[in-house]
Amino acid sequence: MPDTRPPQSHPFPLPHARRAEERLLQGLEALGLDPALAPPLMAYLGLLLRWNRAYNLTAVRDPLDMVTLHLLDSLAVLPQVQGPRLLDVGSGAGLPGIPLALARPDWAVTLLDAVGKKVRFLRQAALELGLGQLEPVHARVETYRPQQGFDTVISRAFAATGDFVRLAGPLCAPGGRLLAMKGRDADDAAAALPAGWGVAATHPLRVPGLPAARHLVEIRRL
Ligand SMILES: C[S@@+](CC[C@H](N)C(=O)[O-])C[C@H]1O[C@@H](n2cnc3c(N)ncnc32)[C@H](O)[C@@H]1O
């Protein structure tokens, strides 16, 4: 059995940790979220930084950027997410699934990824963060067929919206919806959707500390 443990040294120098935590607290306040979320989110950030050295989980390596581009970007979608069963497709290092699971410990959050090392990280993060509600799954979305569908299926930086709906639509429970996290342009989602699906809304998002626009495309069965 290969040793997959990452180096154990402290993930970030203290001044960076302090500034990152300040930025996080400001962001949580701007999003109307509980400041008590800061310690577990910082613990997740620490894990991400530590494992990133060995596993190359994210190209964003600066802790301050990680707060904005990963943690706050993920949490900005929270008002549009409907629980209690959430699936994050192509979750990678757990984004947006882990920040959302930390904010909503009452939800069951499944994190799906096709790459084994990412899922090993997700399992370790679930363990270390004490997130019993988290289920990391190593599978391709094309072949993943759980017994029960999901209330919300979300993805960030996974695929063009049409492909996301084609691949992940079957995983939606009746009455459930798909949420595609997009950047400045919410791509031409409506034109590219498979038959039977429609764009219910395109929500503009405000990510604290991020001047660039973000959008969330909400897709439902017609
Ligand atoms: C660009 S990364 C985005 C990761 C994360 N959502 C984020 O925003 O940081 C895309 C992820 O999708 C995963 N992926 C790609 N094709 C997939 C498939 N068919 N089924 C499941 N996961 C897939 C990749 O392994 C990768 O982790």
Image (tube, grey):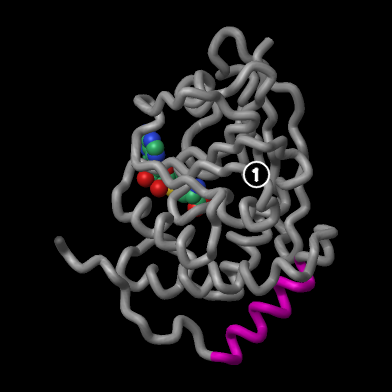
Residue at the spot of label 1 = 107
Q: Is residue 94 left or right of residue 184?
A: left
Assign the C terminus to one quadrant of the image.
top right
Asked if 29 appears above or below 194 in the picture, the reply is below
Picture coordinates of residue 98, whole percent (x, y):
56, 54
Q: Is residue 123 left or right of residue 43?
A: left
Assign the N terminus to one quadrant of the image.
bottom left
Picture coordinates of residue 197, whole percent (x, y):
62, 14
Determine the quadrant in which ligand 1 lies: top left
- In this figure, what is the number of numbered marks? 1
Asked if 18 appears above or below 163 in the picture, the reply is below
- Categorize mark 1 by other alpha carbons within 10 Å: few (<14), some (14-19), many (20+): some
**Identity of the residue drawn at 46% across and 62% down:** 127
**Identity of the residue drawn at 52% across and 24% down:** 148
Q: Nearer the viewer, residue 179 or 8?
A: 8
* Magenta-drawn stretch contains 222: no
**Identity of the residue drawn at 65% across and 86% down:** 18
Q: Which residues are magenta?
A: 14-27
Picture coordinates of residue 45, whole percent (x, y):
54, 70
| Residue type indicated by callout 1 | Trp
Asked if 81 appears above or below 132 in the picture, the reply is above
Q: Nearer the viewer, residue 219 or 110?
A: 110
**Identity of the residue drawn at 76% across and 66% down:** 27
